[in-house]
Image: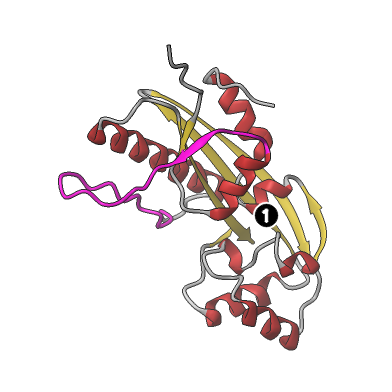
Amino acid sequence: MRIIQPRIYLASQSPRRRELLKQIGINFEMLLMRSDPRRNLEVDETPHPGELPESYVRRVSKAKSEAGCAVLRMRNLPQFPVLAADTTVTLDGKIFGKPDNAEQAAAMLHQLSGREHQVFSAVAIAMDEHIEVAVSTSKVRFATLDEERIRRYLLTREYTDKAGGYAIQGQAGAFIEHLSGSYSGVMGLPLFETVQLLQRFGYPTP
């Protein structure tokens, strides 16, 4: 008799999240969320007016996990938990999304320069009607960045697809004077909270 190894689906294209799950030995499959003409599976990641950052990442991660479960049902795939996540940077209550270009990334870095900002990283796991969500909150203080330092960083293009226009696991790690919270959460997937949720679904964890 063939024993099926426990696994989860990852509803994210993020290489950082794949790397973090591999780091703690989680067996996962990528769940490609390609659009389906029969159903709109797009998740609206636009912040609602007056929406708080923590509420925003909680809503978006939950919606992504629900969309992932819908994909499983449509494709008749084996039922395993679907993991989704969302991370945002916030300063003075303003949500910093992913910059569309270098100019937007530069504007974000100028605002973060010499200041402490918060990073909210939510993870959601769903299976059938069971959904669990957890949020990690971290505080990050940047050194003061001059124009030349920001210009050199933009040349790396690390800012692409990164909330707040920077990647803590890349060269921007040199900007950080102090971090209080979760390094993996700032990177994109809070591992402590992820393991807690997986345990609620009976998944073997480290």
Task: Please say if 84 is above or below 15.
Answer: above
Q: Residue furthest right?
A: 177
Q: Which residue is mark 1?
A: 118
Residue name at image x 56 percent, y 51 percent: 87
Task: Please say if 182 is above or below 159.
Answer: above
Residue 180 % position (x, y): 79, 49
Residue 88 % position (x, y): 56, 55
Q: Residue furthest front?
A: 1
Quadrant for the C terminus, please: top right
Q: Judge left or right: residue 78 versus residue 150.
A: left
Residue 24 % position (x, y): 67, 36
* Front position in the image: 71 or 108: 71
Residue name at image x 41 percent, y 38 percent: 65
Residue numbers of the magenta segment: 24-48
Is residue 91 shown in magenta?
A: no
Q: Judge left or right: residue 204 versus residue 180.
A: left
Q: Quadrant of residue 122?
A: top right
Residue name at image x 68 percent, y 34 percent: 192
Is residue 35 shown in magenta?
A: yes
* Front position in the image: 154 or 59: 154
Q: Judge left or right: residue 139 versus residue 53.
A: right
Residue name at image x 44 percent, y 16 percent: 2
Quadrant for the N terminus, please: top left
Chief SS of the magenta region: loop
Q: Amino acid at mark 1?
A: Gln
Q: Residue furthest top?
A: 1
Other residues around mark 1 within 10 Å, as few (<14) / some (14–19) / many (≥20): many
